Image (cartoon, helix red, strand yellow):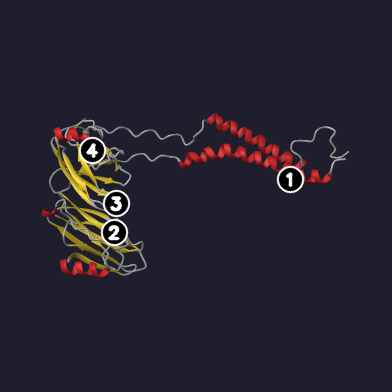
Amino acid sequence: MTDRRAVSRGQPWRRAVPWLVAALLLATVGLPVAGAIGRLPTLPDIGYARSLSNNTTTVPTLVNLTDRPAYSPAFLSAAAGSNLTVHLVNQGTITHSFTVLKQPGVRLNTSWSPAQLDQYFATNGSLVNLSLAPGAQANTTLTFNESTAFDSFEFVSVVPYQFQAGMVGFINITSTAPGLLDFENTTDNYQFIPSVLVANSTHYPFNLDVLVTNTGNLGHTFTLAGQSNASLTPATYMSYFQQYPPLVSVNVPSGAGSTVWANFTVPAAGIYQYICEVSGHFANGMTGFLYVGIPPPPAPPAPSTAIVQGWILVGSGVLLGFGILATLIGTYSGRFPASPPGDSGHH
């Protein structure tokens, strides 16, 4: 006679089998879709140059002061010979300040103590020094004469330890001379972002001014080939620049938020390659292209959000349906698979 206790002990495992089968079948459908969602790539950005403006009228710019602490935005721009009006809003619950350095091109040391920071401004002065209580708003207007073209003015919060925690920004001054303006960023991942710049002009040569901002901690260079359609490689760029000097080569200072102007004259239409000359950076992929008078390449089509083919998903769905049906049968019958004919569970 069969031991009924053995049968009783076997029943939970038999009841669990259909649920296990259903879970595995569900994974065949769910995991590919979930994996596809997590792998959607980000298409590369393209930076389009815009005309430099000779406008000398007041341009209002909103800057929010937050408790992170931070400025939003942290990078402002103004044309030389123009006024910049800044509308400040303290969105936080503590006091912040908007204090603009008087000297261009100076970057303060975030390791300074609050006393050292106060001593700097006591000695050198400031263009603006406004303190805003929580919820307060204020306007301030700065005037930049033409001699400040391509300068950069840092602004900070002098409330103790806010500057040290990252509450810092920059006002970058463009030129009043005719030309085009573009923006580029460098990263610690050995990338230029965007990796494609576009500048279209109706005449040649023309002036192009690129504001390069470091978003990481490593120093870089922005070095542009002197000829269009030249194909540089990590093995050939040094000998190429010995024969053909670059149109521009500037050092991008280390430290997040550091900026530098790359100002140069573009002689003719074409595709110009730019690289980072710091050892190992170009070899790790740090390069980009400037398209002048030529449409940039179209963005690649977005890949399918499914990793597996559609017919596989359909088949998995059918199997999943069988799994659910088997689960229901097994649950109500108490055995999975069904007992062999004649097996009554005991003799």
Question: Residue 87 in the image: x percent, y percent?
Answer: 26, 61
Label 2: state its secondary structure. Answer: strand
Q: Which residue corresponds to mark 4? A: 274
Q: Label 4 sits on what residue type?
A: Tyr
Q: Which residue corresponds to mark 3? A: 217
Question: Does 67 appear above or below 41?
Answer: below
Circle 1 Cα neighbour tier, 10 Å, few/some/many (<14 / 14–19 / ≥20): few
Disc 4 vs disc 1: Cβ atoms closer than 8 Å? no
> As drawn, is 67 to the left or to the right of 143?
right
Of marks 3 and 2, the one in the foreground: 3
Closer to the camera in the image, 49 or 230: 230
- Residue placed at 64% from the left, 39% from the top? 22
Label 1: state its secondary structure. Answer: helix
> As drawn, is 252 to the left or to the right of 64?
left
For the residues labelled 2 and 4, the Cα–Cα distance comes to: 33 Å
Q: Label 2 sits on what residue type?
A: Val
Label 3: state its secondary structure. Answer: loop
For the residues labelled 1 and 2, the Cα–Cα distance comes to: 65 Å
For the residues labelled 4 and 3, the Cα–Cα distance comes to: 20 Å
Q: Label 3 sits on what residue type?
A: Asn
Disc 3 vs disc 2: Cβ atoms closer than 8 Å? no
Of marks 1 and 2, the one in the foreground: 1
Question: Residue 20 in the image: x percent, y percent?
Answer: 65, 41
Circle 4 Cα neighbour tier, 10 Å, few/some/many (<14 / 14–19 / ≥20): many
For the residues labelled 4 and 1, the Cα–Cα distance comes to: 67 Å
Question: Residue 89 in the image: x percent, y percent?
Answer: 31, 63
Q: Label 1 sits on what residue type?
A: Pro
N-terminal of the two: label 2 or label 4?
A: 2
Q: Which residue corresponds to mark 1? A: 12
Q: Which residue corresponds to mark 2? A: 63
N-terminal of the two: label 1 or label 3?
A: 1
